[in-house]
Amino acid sequence: MSLLEAPGYEAVFGTPEGDTYRIPLVCWREEGDHMYGMVLIKGHLRRVEQLPNFLRYGTQDGGDNSAASSFDVPAAGRRPGGTRAPALR
């Protein structure tokens, strides 16, 4: 398993009332050929896709105002800006 930095990325969640809230991503988790966003919940790293009401990934610069937009997890070993990042092992 590799953990890669995820600066500037957030997980966007929905509420039953139709509002959204965001939690900053701590890192991406590499598992085989897939990458998963990770957030810190009550002191534990959790995969975003396994949390209730997850909608999509977003950026902290607010560039995802459209409800239809979504952001793909960067490729393994790549930072969101495209520069190579060392894997933490």
Image (spheres, rainbow, N blue to C red):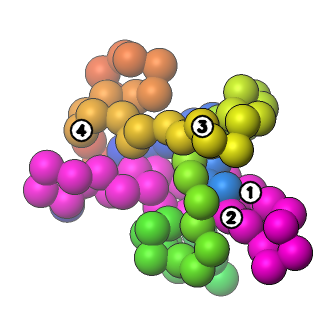
- CA separation, marks 1 and 4? 23 Å
| Residue position for label 2 | 13
Q: Secondary structure at mark 4?
A: loop
| Residue position for label 3 | 69
Q: Secondary structure at mark 3?
A: loop
The N terminus, quarter of image: bottom left
| Residue position for label 1 | 22
Q: In the rendered structure, which amino acid carries the disc numbered 2?
A: Phe
Rendered image quadrant of residue 21: bottom right
Number of other residues with Cα within 10 Å of mark 1, as a class: few under 14, some 14 to 19, many 20 or more: some
Q: Which mark is residue 39?
A: none
Examine the residues drawn in magenta and state their main secondary structure: strand
Q: In the rendered structure, which amino acid carries the disc numbered 4?
A: Ala
Q: Which residues are magenta?
A: 13-39
Q: Is residue 46 visible?
A: yes
Which comes before the other along the chain, label 3 or label 1?
Answer: 1
Q: In the rendered structure, which amino acid carries the disc numbered 3?
A: Ser
- CA separation, marks 2 and 3? 13 Å
- CA separation, marks 2 and 1? 6 Å
Select label 2 or label 3 by which is in front: 3
Which comes before the other along the chain, label 3 or label 4?
Answer: 3
- CA separation, marks 2 and 4? 24 Å
Which comes before the other along the chain, label 2 or label 3?
Answer: 2
Q: Nearer the viewer, residue 89 or 56?
A: 56
